[in-house]
Image (cartoon, grey):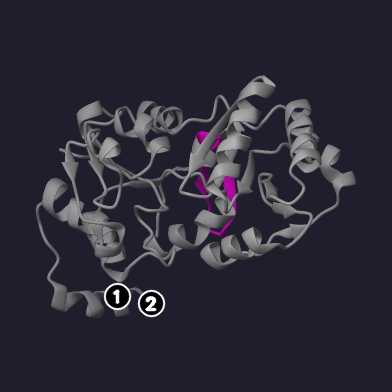
Amino acid sequence: MIKHIFLDMDGTLLNSQGTVSTKNITVIQKSGLPTTLVSARAPIEMEPAIKQLSLTAPQIAFNGGMIFQPQSNGSIRALETHALDSQVSFQLISWLSEHYPDVCLSYYTKDSWLTTIIDTGIKIEMKLTGLKPSLTSKSALQHHAQAGIFKVMLIVLDKNILLKIQAELTNLGLTGIVVQQSGSMYLEITSQEATKSRGLSYIVNSENLLREETAAFGDGHNDLPMLTSVGTPIVMGNTLDVIKTAGKFVTKTNDEDGVAYGIETYIKQTPVKLDNIEEQADSLQ
């Protein structure tokens, strides 16, 4: 019997418009199962979905860089954190700014999304997340690095440049970092200690869960450690074939309410009637 569900967000829980569908909300809430979002996103970017789904379980941000407990007043309580080393994050952002000044660059602290300029990439992310970054200066980088930077994000529209940057970052030999491609145009740099499987293990151990009592939904390469850690891995229909091989089941796409379908079909096996969804959704307002 499944006792806890772990959900990736982008490409999984969220549809192509970056929102949680009415059916996903309804089915997740009706399941009654504790649910944890496991995302590369920052807590401030996860907050709308947490509220929509009325989640009370611990949540995982920054690909496992932060495990936090949502509070009733909208704040968060950090349970475990793995920020980038301050010196390494300073070197990393300084190097990127010098060698790729035209590439969209931003970074995240515990509570803020920061950038020096609102460019095309930032506008794309703003539209996707509904958030606006705080403008900062290069001179403030040292302060932010000391306070703790959890993720550095590059939005690179040219695939060849993205691959070039990824290779050069690897060759820099900076210690304690992981460079991952997320989607077709994102490069995300987090602490080596920040993995989705590590965040999942923290919750599994704290709740004394057995492997067979856990299920996870994902669609990306960074979801593979999470998918291989649970008893019931479910992959999205919109993912690559290489990711699908990691799943016990393949559900529908994120634009076809694949999470809801997976819960109904492979976990609870109690479908929600379509004609009741709008009525149930109205009651949640």
What residue is drawn where x is 80% and y is 34%?
146
Q: How many labels does the image show?
A: 2
x 53%, y 50%: residue: 185
Amino acid under label 2?
Gln
> Residue at 49% across / 63% down in the picture?
48
Element type at mark 2:
loop
Res. 276 image quadrant: bottom left
Q: In this view, does 23 lie above or below 6?
A: below
Q: Which residue is disc 2 drawn over?
A: 285
Q: Can residue 174 be seen in this view?
A: no
Q: In 3D space, how far apart are the residues under numbered discs 1 and 2 (Cα atoms)?
A: 7 Å
Q: What stretch is highlighted in magenta?
A: 64-78
Horizontal side of 246 relative to 135 (left or right) equals left
Which of the 4 quarters of the picture holds residue 18?
Answer: bottom left
Instruction: Judge from the rendering whether residue 187 lies leftward or rightward of residue 214; answer left or right.
Output: right
Q: Is residue 113 above or below residue 213?
A: below
